[in-house]
Image (spheres, rainbow, N blue to C red):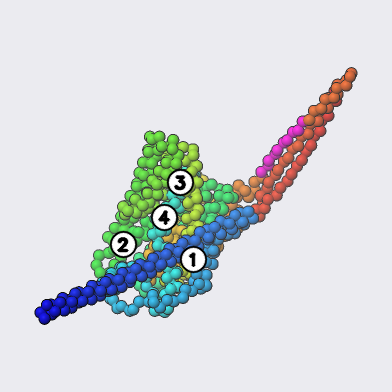
Amino acid sequence: MGSRWKSNANYGASGTLSLCVLVSLTICLSRAEDSAMENIVTEKKAEESHRQDSADLLIFIMLLTLTILTIWLFKHRRFRFLHETGLAMIYGLLVGVVLRYGIHVPRDINNITLSCHVNASPPTLLVNVSGKFYEYTLKGEISAKEVDDVQDNEMLRKVTFDPEVFFNILLPPIIFHAGYSLKRRHFFRNLGSILAYAFLGTVISCFIIGLLMYGCVMLMKQVGQLGGDFFFTDCLYFGAIVSATDPVTVLAIFNELQVDVDLYALLFGESVLNDAVAIVLSSSIGAYQPQGDNSHTFEAMAMLKSFGVFLGVFSGSFALGVVIGVMTALVTKFTKLRDFQLLETALFFLMSWSTFLLAEACGFTGVVAVLFCGITQAHYTYNNLSPESQDRTKQLFELLNFLAENFIFSYMGLALFTFQNHVFNPIFIIGAFLGIFLGRAANIYPLSFLLNLGRRNKISPNFQHMMMFAGLRGAMTFALSIRDTATYARQMMFSTTLLVVFFTVWVCGGGTTQMLSCQRIRSACSSAVYTHTHTHTYAHARTHTHSHNTHTYTHTHTHTHTHICMRTRTHKLTHTHAHSFSLTHTHTH
């Protein structure tokens, strides 16, 4: 009896143990299945995200391809009313309209999370779900009326690039190419005037635009159209970023028509240097911090500190760019690297690009550093390179400049419809256009008058009008405005900047040829006549010998082809062909 009870007890214990093991295995298997399902879902989402990213990049590649093909058609037809950058913006606008209004992603209710009330919006959020921690990053604020379109917003955010992409990847080749392709002889011959326009003119333009925009902000506040904080320092910041000129369209037409070299040097040199001045000036305005609770009052010490920041950042960036350029020149001069052209080109490329990143990492301005690095490389390093590397570096940075510039302009058109937080205000927009016009006029005309007092080669009034007209805004203005769009003021600046760039590129850039004709600025192709003469002589001799006489016939055929190419003011080609023939017969007995 006791043994039977023991056996039953053992049986019950073993049964309980088996049941526990079975339950544990079931739980483990279910957890393993859940984990496997989660892994499958995660992999599918990662694959879908990869495909979406590839499609987004393909959109920009197709935009550039279409732009290049249309540019070829325009050049073939000699159509100068629209430059390639304006064309890229138009294609970007069309794609932006399609993405904004033509494509809608079905809403998936399973992807909508429950509400969670917090006091602030942390940049990184850790969520504990059943013992598993998930990390989420802040992408931006969505208004209440946009919650239903959260999937469409996600798609639009996919085609919105991080502003650092523009600064660290797209801007360096554009700025370096500007310094590397600089025509030094004409640049240094007009260096004093270029420095006056770039430094004094940019500061004058910045303060005039800033003061006028502050008046517009006060007017907006009076009529109740101001939806957030907008301080005087914000107005000065806007004045700094829109004072950066980028007359790429005008300069391309100048180069094609071979306009006066001094006018080209003044415009090109000013646009190159005032980009650097504008970015340092905007950083200095951002560093303006008076003591006390109110950080937007005027204080002399804070202003002097901002001025010191301006000088320190600019001089430090200048020194860094020159030092790296000289280092590259010494390496290429005292090594046998020129025997290996591929390595030589690669080192040149990496040293040049690293200048920008090193300056940014050290707290300086990469734009200034890479600009003066490019000028130093062109003056010293270029002569130490092998002929193959000289051609490669020129072509490489010319290609990168072309692609980066057109990419930025096409993205501008896209951003007009894909950016989520546009703030358009008619008063601010009208004030911006008026301020840019007055700021440009206060830059060009008074400084030109003062410069002409000491210049041997005067800056004529028609040159001044052309420089006033050619103050286009472009890639640098856009990159500075998109870098910070967190506040209401910066969002309004960004939206207005896009309209300013569109207007100046399309209207001012498209009217360059007509402005040249209106101001009677002569170009090498406007009235020049080119004559090419080709002379072809064909001689044919035949000799016949008879029993008593020898007859020799010599036939000489001279064909003279004269080609006269005259380019008229309407930029059409007129061809004149002249042909002359001479025939010579010689009869010898």
C-alpha gap between disc 1 and disc 2: 33 Å
Q: Secondary structure at mark 4?
A: helix
Q: As drawn, which residue projects farthest toward the left? A: 2
C-alpha gap between disc 3 and disc 1: 30 Å
Residue 288: mark: 2
On screen, residue 585 above or below 577: above
Q: Nearer the viewer, mark 2 or mark 4?
A: 4
Instruction: Please tell me whether the stretch drawn in magenta is mainly helix, strand or loop.
Output: strand
- In the rendered structure, which disc, 3 or 2, sits on the residue that comes first in sequence? 3
Query: In the rendered image, which residue does mark 4 sit on?
Result: 169
Between residues 324 and 20, which one lies in front from this camera angle?
20
**What's under tag 4, amino acid-wise?**
Ile
Instruction: Count residues near mark 3 (Cα–Cα under 10 Å), then give few for <14, some for 14-19, many for 20+.
Output: many
C-alpha gap between disc 2 and disc 4: 28 Å
Residue 414: mark: 1
Q: As drawn, which residue projects farthest toward the bottom? A: 1
